[in-house]
Image (spheres, rainbow, N blue to C red):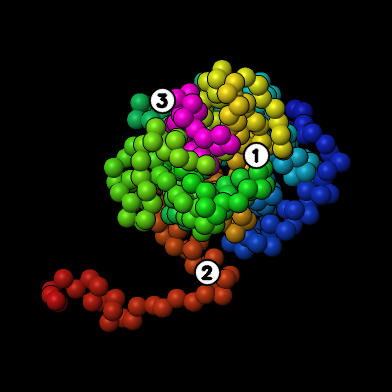
Amino acid sequence: MTSLASVQKSKVKNPALAEQGKLKIEWAESRMPVLMKLREEAKKTLPLKGMRIAGCLHVTKETGVLVRTLKAAGAEIAWSGCNPLSTQDDIAAALAEEVSMYAWHGMNKEEFYWAIERTLDFKPTLTLDDGADLIFTVHSKFPELAKYVLGGTEETTTGVHRLRAMAKDGALKYPVIAINDAETKWDFDNVYGTGQSSIDGIIRSTNVLLGGKVFVVAGFGHCGRGCAMRARGMGARVVVTEIKPTAALKAVLEGYEVMTMDEAAKVGDIFITATGMKDVLVDRHFRSMKDGAIVCNTGHYDCEINLGQLKELAESSREIRANNEEYSFKNGKKIFVLAQGRLVNLAAAEGHPSEVMDMSFANQFLGMVRLAKEGGSMKPIVYDIDPAQDQEIALVKLSAMGMRLDQLTSEQAKYSDDYSSGT
């Protein structure tokens, strides 16, 4: 076993930002009662004692709360960011005083994977992922490390989808828990978190009025639904594009107009992609767009908008505001791309509100605890969380909000299972 003492401790952009980062983490802690309750319990039982956790997840104040909770449970931790533009440097500086941290805003591709590899230097026993880059790095470049890993967790839709494909092909070397597929993750974080934080990123980088704008959402999954909901709440006229009939039908019945992207490109003022698929916006769409169209992405990877084709079409480009790049065409038309096509809610804003990440990260924490205890006997497949865990997390959250629930009486409970009672 390699200890963290024998590897480079941390690399962040500016250690002097640590005090500022600590204040932000403390603010998030005041908004995350479920995770804080788990932390207090874990301090007594140390369920992660002896575990070495490698994490690859957006370095935000909410992640800071998760990292501190994992550490309080007894784990040794090395961490990297899961997106080159999502790391908040003050948070990274604060956490570098507590764990091994390899992350800074604006990493290039080589630096990004260098940082992931540093988190593997101490032969982790657990991996924690958002997008599965860490797991893929273990499997593709350091397969010999898989024998040390009891299991991993995966935070996001794209990562879970790819890991299920790996498991189906027999390529997955250790068990992974699909945190994304927990109801208290995908139906809250993905919808309400993505919706609010993506609108936040758009407004911070443009300060445009959303009211009256034609707001085009590519993809009506949970993330796209959240974006559509919040854009409509700001007074925008929302158009949805989809490839899945049932998703498109849901959008129609919720009152949105559905059309192809070829059609939407001609009428949209603001475009946001939320599909997890590459080439959602390509050269023919850019040619059709209005002068002044704003384009951004809230899917995990930056390939949804084909920026290479946009650069070929444009005569010049310049950064006109922070996280806002203007592409000028020969005919005078301009298209504005936010956050370099990466996650607009994290690159141009602060990511999801603490209140929704509370539930997502409670699932992450409990996933780590389960794997520490049971991972050695689990098969190398993708597991869902126990539905009872969803209900418990939701109950704690509601209690912290001062909400109370009705309960079935004994007669009602009996009736619910009584198949002989008829109508």
Question: Which residue is at the front of the view, 83 or 332?
Answer: 332
Q: Amino acid at mark 3?
A: Ala
Side (left or right) of 183 relative to 302:
left
Total of numbered circles in the picture?
A: 3
Crowd class of label 1 (few under 14; some 14 to 19; many from 20; radius 10 Å): many
Q: Which mark is residue 347?
A: 1
Residue 391 sits inside the magenta stretch = no
Specify whether residue 82 is in view.
no
Q: What x and y, as percent, mark residue 352? A: 60, 51
Q: Which mark is residue 398?
A: 2
> Which corner quadrant holds the N terminus?
top right
Q: What x and y, as percent, mark residue 237? A: 46, 51
Q: Amino acid at mark 1?
A: Ala
Crowd class of label 2 (few under 14; some 14 to 19; many from 20; radius 10 Å): some
Relative vertical location of residue 346 with respect to residue 137 in this rendering, above or below: below
- The earlier-in-sequence mark between 3 and 1 is 3
- The earlier-in-sequence mark between 1 and 2 is 1
Q: What x and y, as percent, mark residue 220? A: 40, 45
Q: Amino acid at mark 2?
A: Leu
Q: Nearer the viewer, mark 3 or mark 1?
A: 1
- In space, the residues marked 3 and 1 are separated at their CA atoms by 33 Å
Residue numbers of the magenta segment? 270-293
Question: Which residue is at the front of the view, 188 or 37?
Answer: 188
Question: Which residue is at the front of the view, 177 or 262?
Answer: 262
Relative vertical location of residue 40 with respect to residue 115 in this rendering, above or below: below
**What's the residue at 65%, 39% (across, down)?**
347
Q: Secondary structure at mark 3?
A: loop
Q: What x and y, as percent, mark residue 124? A: 61, 33
Q: Which mark is residue 171?
A: 3
> Which corner quadrant holds the C terminus?
bottom left
- Are the residues tagged 1 and 2 within 8 Å (C-beta)? no
